[in-house]
Amino acid sequence: MAGRFARSWALAKASAGMLNRERRLLVFPLLSGLCCLLVLASFAAPVFAAFEAHSGSAPVQSMQHSSGFYIGLFVFYVVQYSVIFFFNTALVGSAMACMNGERPSVGDGLRLAASKWPQILGYALIASTVGMVLRMLQERLGLIGRLLIGLVGLAWTVATFLVVPVLAATDVGPYEAVKRSTQLLKQTWGENIIGNAGISVVFSLGFMLIVVALFAGITFSVSLHAAVLIPVLAVLGVLAFIALALIQSALQGIYAAALYRYAEYGDAGNGFDQALLDQAFRSKR
C-alpha cells in the first residue's frame, strides 16, 4: 500500500509537470467556471422571483418539495452537468493530445468537445438522474440512511471518474462510457482513489493556508488601524482561491487522462515516465 501511495503521488507530480508546460489547459476550467456561474444566475433569478411572488401565500418549504421544484432542479442539473462535462472533455482531450506529442490549441479542445456534444448531453442526463434519485432518497431517510446514500454517491463518483476520458478518446455512447469506466476501475481503483484523495488533500491545505494568511493579514491591518488594506486583502484572497481552484481542476483532468491512457493502451505518452506507470498498474486483462 505504501508503494501505491508513492506511485500515485509520483503520477500526480508528473501531471503537474505537464500542466506547468501546457498552462493553456487552465483556460478550460476557467471557461467552465464562468459558464457555470451564468447558468446558476439564469436559474436563480426566476427561482427567487417565484419565492418572492408566493411569499405570502405558500411556505417556501412546501414549494421546495413540489413537483415543479424537482423538475426545475433536474433541468438545472442537466444544464450544469452539460457545461462541466463539455469543458472537461475539452481539457482531457487536449491533455491526451499533449501526451501524443502534439500542441493543441484551446480551439482544438473546444472543437473536440463540440464533436462529442450528443454523448456529453446523454451522460449529463444519466448523471442528473442519479443525482436527483440520491438527493430525494437523502431527504426521506434518517441520519444512517443519509450516510449510506452518501457512500453510494462516492462509489458512483469513483466508478465514473474515467467516463470523460472515454468520451474524449472514443465514439461510444454515454451508457457504454459509464460501463467502460466501471470496467477500467478494476485496473485503476488504487491510483484512482489514492491519487484523487492526495490531490484533494494537498489543495485543501492550500485553501486553508490562504484562509489563515487572509485572517492574519486582516488582523494585522486592524491592529495598525489600516482598514483600507482589508478590501485589498479580500480581493487578493479571492484571486488566490480562484487560481488554486483552476489548478486543481486542470490537474485532476490531466490525471484522469493519464490513468485512462495507460489502463486502456498500456502507454504512458509524452511527458510521463513509462517505467513509473508500469509499476503503478498491474493489468488484469
Image: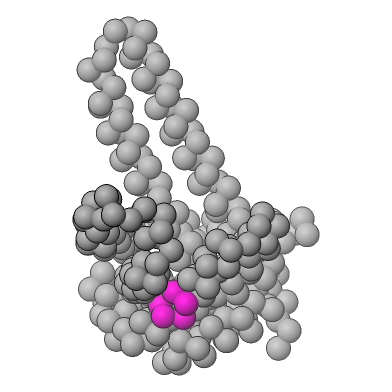
Q: Please state, as top left, top right, bottom left or bottom right, where the C terminus lies in the image.
A: bottom right
Q: Toward which corner of the image does residue 11 lie, by quadrant?
A: bottom right
Going 50% across and 46% down the picture, which residue do you hit?
A: 203
Front residue of this view, candidates 180 and 2: 180
For the question of whether residue 31 can be seen, the reply is no
The picture places residue 40, in percent across and down from the top left corner, at 29, 59
Q: Residue at x 38, y 42 (%)?
A: 241
State the extent of the magenta-drawn residues as a range. 124-129
| Furthest residue toward front | 57
* Along the viewing direction, whichever of 117 and 275 lies nearer the viewer: 117
In the image, residue 247 lies at what x, y percent? 40, 53
- Look at the picture and state if 76 lies above or below 196: below
Determine the residue positioned at 67% across, 61% down.
145
Relative to 85, residue 126 above or below: below
Which of 150/234 is in front?
A: 150
How many numbered marks, from 0 up?
Answer: 0
